[in-house]
Image (tube, rainbow, N blue to C red):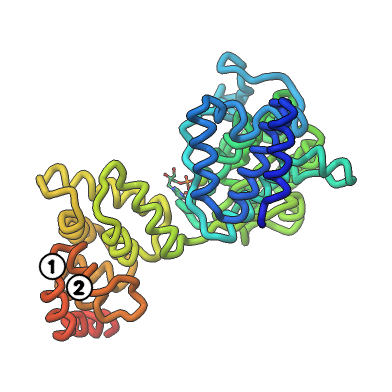
Amino acid sequence: MEHFAVIQSIIRAGLSGDTAAFKKQVLRLFRRLEKAGATKEAATIQRLLKSAGEAKEILPSRVELSRSHVSGETLTPETHVPIDRETGAVLCEVYFLSDQQAVPVYEEHVRAAIAGLLEEWSCSDELRNVGVEPTRSLLIFGPPGSGKTLTAHYIAESLGLPLVTAKIDGLISSFLGTTARNISNLFEFANRYSCLLLLDEFDALAKIRDDPQEVGEIKRVVNSLLQNLDQRRAFGVTIAVTNHDRLLDPAVWRRFETHVHIGEPGSHARTMMIERFLAPLKPEPPIFSIIAYCLEGLSGADLERICLSLKRTLVLSGTSHDGPGLFRALSGVLARLPSQSNDAARILATDPDAFISLIANDSEFPLQQAKIGQATGYGQSRVSAIKKAKLHSPLMEASRA
Ligand SMILES: Nc1ncnc2c1ncn2[C@@H]1O[C@H](COP(=O)(O)OP(=O)(O)OP(=O)(O)O)[C@@H](O)[C@H]1O
Ligand SMILES: [Mg+2]
């Protein structure tokens, strides 16, 4: 039986009355379940702990992680952050734990990679006992709106650490020498406090490197950043985030022990995000698959924006908050977009009947005619007639022409 060893340890700790050991083992089970993709079971443990008032204390394993993984003073909202001496602009922002952070929705391999890192950090002492240091630096890359910054916040939340966020753009000064000083002040600050350092929009570094102006100065800046990154390993975890991984040269790439690519969400991830972003609306689930089908190729941020538009449209037009209402609203919302991301979206924006014909004829679409009819309000017999008429064919041909 999977996880039996952990269950045994939980029982042993429970019987011995050692609460700290008990909590540690429950957390281990939680992480194992998360890593194995048993999200429902992991969520059940979380709920049980919450109802016992324990979740905040042990999920994520805040105390253990921060003690063994990072050193430094405690950041408070009163702590002064470093500023650019020429302009007075702050060099970073500090985000404190919110307890509001929802787990981002990932493709399976990304979920496993992030869960693996969290597990690694929760076992840092065990790793050290066998001579392995837990990962200290992570590079997250992927297209705009894919949830990279969100992931950094989620990791900070999971580690129980405040997040010190700096955008590389914000460190660059037009005054000679100030950029390097800004970088060193930022790292000094991050190393002094117990925190997770996020270098957001990291590709800005590559852009300044290509700037033909001030070549010597730029080299100094890049070198100073690389040195600071190396030294930071002794103090805590650093995450860098970029949209343009190709712009980063190997010297920068090498500084990061782990690289995680968050790509476009697949059909399952899109469906889950749509369900989340449409909450508190609770239509019958098949409509989520229909919406996800139309929105292929869009990022999490795009999906969120469209779901907000859908909710707005439903309320303002007085349309029912169910599947058929959402289907009509989606057609209107897509029609108002400057461009659609794929054929299905284009067809729904112009002719909802043709769209029904498209999905009813698509052997890979997961819903049967009866479900399509129910979710959209068309009814099974109308879906069947539309399917036979192949109403989508002329529009598909037109879009291919
Ligand atoms: N994978 C995801 N799971 C859940 N929500 C997501 C996901 N991706 C994006 N979102 C939603 O989109 C918002 C924007 O995401 P985020 O800022 O993290 O994207 P990003 O990859 O950092 O984008 P950019 O490259 O433009 O900085 C998030 O706050 C969240 O609401
Ligand atoms: Mg971002």
The reply to whether dot 2 and dot 1 touch (C-beta < 8 Å) is yes
| Residue drawn at 29 percent across, 83 percent down | 400
* Quarter that holds the N terminus: bottom right
Q: Is residue 64 visible?
A: yes
The type of residue carrying mark 2 is Ile
State the SS at label 2.
helix
Ligand 1 neighbours mark 1 (CB distance < 8 Å): no
Is 292 left, or right, of 355 in this rendering?
right
Is 387 left, or right, of 293 in this rendering?
left
User: In front here: 256 or 68?
Assistant: 68
User: In front here: 387 or 174?
Assistant: 387
* Quarter that holds the C terminus: bottom left
Report crowding for label 1: few under 14, some 14 to 19, many 20 or more residues within 10 A (C-alpha). some
The type of residue carrying mark 1 is Tyr
User: On screen, 219 above or below 366?
Assistant: above
* Residue placed under numbered mark 1 in the picture: 378
* Residue placed under numbered mark 2 in the picture: 356
Q: Position of residue 97 (x, y in %)?
A: 55, 28
Question: Disc 2 to disc 1, how far (Cα)?
Answer: 9 Å
Q: Position of residue 319 (x, y in %)?
A: 11, 49
Ligand 1 neighbours mark 2 (CB distance < 8 Å): no
